[in-house]
């Protein structure tokens, strides 16, 4: 009988055991489904500023589905409002951390920031 590199003990039906990694199929099932509107959004652009280089992505009203707090004015960016998603291009902790620290800005707040 062929041996497996994975222990069968502690496995639950439908998910990995505690501490075990999910398979690529399980990870795929946990992700959000693909949306044509999301795919058609423009790619992020690089904006150079005195405080560094920033990746800026425009979010269309149809894809703005949650409330966000704009760091520029402290007010809410409500669903259905076109806005910008901004993150640093170069981060000391790496590009993944920079992307995870992204913020949603009103366009006017981003353009007039200091």
Image (cartoon, rainbow, N blue to C red):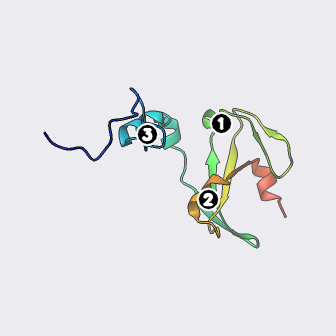
Between the C-alphas of marks 1 and 2, the distance is: 22 Å
Q: Which mark is residue 109?
A: none
Q: What x and y, as percent, mark residue 56?
A: 64, 57
User: Which comes sooner in the sequence, label 1 or label 3?
Assistant: 3
Q: Report the residue marked by disc 2.
A: 97
Between residues 11 and 27, which one lies in front from this camera angle? 11
User: Which comes sooner in the sequence, label 1 or label 2?
Assistant: 1
Q: Quadrant of residue 54?
A: bottom right
Tell me the element at label 2. Answer: helix
- Residue 40 position (above or below residue 80): below
Q: Decide: marks 2, 3 in contact (CB < 8 A)?
A: no
Between the C-alphas of marks 1 and 3, the distance is: 24 Å
Q: Is residue 68 left or right of residue 9?
A: right
Q: Pointer 3: residues within 10 angstroms few (<14), some, or many (20+)?
A: few
Between residues 69 and 110, which one lies in front from this camera angle? 69
Q: Report the residue marked by disc 3.
A: 27
């Amino acid at each position: 009988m062929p041996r497996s590199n994975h222990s069968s003990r502690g496995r639950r039906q439908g998910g990995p055991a505690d501490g075990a990694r999910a398979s690529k199929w399980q990870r795929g099932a946990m992700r959000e489904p693909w949306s044509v509107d999301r795919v058609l959004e423009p790619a992020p652009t690089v904006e150079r500023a005195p405080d560094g280089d920033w990746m800026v992505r425009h979010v269309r009203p149809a894809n703005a589905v949650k409330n966000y707090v704009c760091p520029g004015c402290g007010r809410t960016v409500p669903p259905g409002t076109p806005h910008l998603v901004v993150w640093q291009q170069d981060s000391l902790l790496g590009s993944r951390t920079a992307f995870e620290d992204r913020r949603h800005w009103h366009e006017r707040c981003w353009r007039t920031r200091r």
